[in-house]
Amino acid sequence: MTEPADTLRIAIAQLNPTVGDVSGNLAIARRTRESAGASGADLVVFPELFIAGYPAEDLVLKPAFLAACREAVEALAAETVSGAAVLIGAPWVEGGLLYNSVLLLEGGRVSAVRHKVDLPNYGVFDEKRVFAAGPMPGPIPFRGVRLGVPVCEDIWGADVVECLAETGAEILIVPNGSPYRRSVYAERENIAVARVVESKLPLLYVNQVGGQDELVFDGASFVLNADRFPALQFPSFVERVRVTRWRRFEDGWRCVGGNLVEPLQGDAADYAACVLGLRDYVNKNGFPGVVLGLSGGIDSALCAAMAVDALGPERVRCLMLPYRFTSPESLADAAAVAEALGVGYEVVPIGPAVEGLEQVLAPLFEGVARDVTEENLQARVRGTLLMSVSNKFGAMVVTTGNKSEMSTGYATLYGDMNGGFNPIKDLYKTEVVRLARLRNSWKPADALGPDGVVIPERVIEKPPSAELREDQTDEAALAPYGVLDTVLARLVEGESPVDEIVADGFDAALVARIARLLAGAEYKRRQAAPGVKVTGRNFGRDRRYPITNRFRED
């Protein structure tokens, strides 16, 4: 029998796996184990489903993928004859059922397996489609210590941790794939404190970091001792590996000597999430860089700043695509943003292409007045030119529509909606303004862009306009953005009834019109590029409305 240990060194591996890159994720795990072991770690703890990447979605239904994951786990296990043991997540088939599992690798073998019990099936999560729920777990014996290993959602209710405490667990280790959204830090902390209070056990929370399609995982791993006080807090949105020191005292185990780093909060966290999401989408999908239309407006300026912070100026190409409605101020503002960011910048007038299309269409449109159709031709020419540059040189088109536009359909399909990814898709216009001002005074620690003002104040202050006709402004077509965004947030994130919003003092006709625009634009949103999720409910995995839908609130 193994004698109880008095000390333990556990390495927290807050790392960035890539979904489907089993060999690459295995290589990361190997390097991390070797370096952590050299620093004295007894055990290295990785996030949820690390070998597969999270969320792997329907990849886990492919037998070849499951076989590759199992081979990787067994190969890593074979290397643990000596040195640090590993606690790592992978999809695992047992008894003909597929589980979201955590595996302890030591002594050259898979020495213990525990399965996730509480499978989330709300918001962005859909685990019940693909995984079976595991049985209530008991603790895992490890070098004389009983480790309780609830997986992510397993700590959001009391039952799994209660079972582990009652069956003798001494330390709770929680592997997570918990994506970023506003207020998530406080929610996680409250949940962890509740489990610590109930179980009277210390809790180590290790979270994935990095972008995966529209999700961004922020890391921000932490340790709470049994007295509820934080012993360690990792930074957010960056990879970190650190060996934590644990000692057994008369009243149980404690983590000693950890560092506390305040995670990013509020607008700074949103900005960092957008940058990381864009960076990983571009890099993990193998694009050499990005190209975007720089219009002189705030949306494209903020997207350009995020792209430079994510990739560096040498990987960002900006095109100004003016037509006769483009103001001299917009030309000057686009050039100023490009110069401040240090990006490649070219002006490509689109007049010949627009007028050529109008000439081709003239026989078909004879006798019909000009309307939004001709305006959309301008946007579609711009979209086609950007996609052509993308096709020719391989750079991904960054599309730049904000959440206010995505909500109301104030965007042109196959025009300004063209692109591979949208970093501001989940930011309302008023939030775009806040983040632009923030970026002029701050940037993330790992940002590759320049310091200081990169978005001139005139770009932030001027009335937003698509500039598709004379004297056009967004707010004249929609509503003042302060009102529009407030109503949209209540309709989208809050699912508030129209009459409830009106009862709170908003104009009834305006609220009804905004609700109609929101419902009518579903077909556009289904065809929009993916983009970073930062709010509690984005257009994508969170919100699934039918396109064909006749229900409207009066």
Image (cartoon, rainbow, N blue to C red):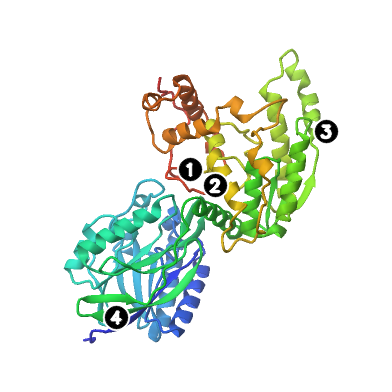
Q: Which quadrant would the C terminus be assigned to in this image?
A: top left
Q: Amino acid at mark 4?
A: Arg
Along the polypeptide, which appears first: circle 2 or circle 3?
3
**Could you tell me how far apart the alpha carbons at marks 2 and 3 are, in whole angstroms?**
32 Å
Q: How would you rate the neighbour count of disc 3 (Cα within 10 Å): few for under 14, some for 14-19, many for 20 or more?
A: few
**Whole-percent x and y of residue 535?**
45, 45
**Could you tell me how far apart the alpha carbons at marks 4 and 2 are, in whole angstroms?**
44 Å
Q: Amino acid at mark 1?
A: Gly
Q: In the picture shown, does residue 200 fall above or below 337?
A: below
Outermost residue to the right:
352
Q: In the figure, is residue 242 to the left or right of 147?
A: right
| Mark 2, residue position | 531
Q: Secondary structure at mark 2?
A: loop
State if disc 3 and disc 1 touch (CB < 8 Å): no
Answer whether residue 7 is visible to the viewer in this image: yes
Along the polypeptide, which appears first: circle 4 or circle 2?
4
Residue at 68% x, 41% y: name it: 458
Query: Which dot, 3 or 4, sits closer to the camera?
Result: 4
State if disc 1 and disc 2 touch (CB < 8 Å): yes
| Mark 3, residue position | 352
| Mark 1, residue position | 540
**Could you tell me how far apart the alpha carbons at marks 4 and 1 are, in whole angstroms?**
45 Å
Q: How would you rate the neighbour count of disc 4 (Cα within 10 Å): few for under 14, some for 14-19, many for 20 or more?
A: some
**Could you tell me how far apart the alpha carbons at marks 1 and 3 are, in whole angstroms?**
37 Å
Query: Which dot, 4 or 1, sits closer to the camera?
Result: 4
**Whole-percent x and y of residue 43?**
37, 78
Q: In the picture shown, does residue 160 fall above or below 111?
A: above
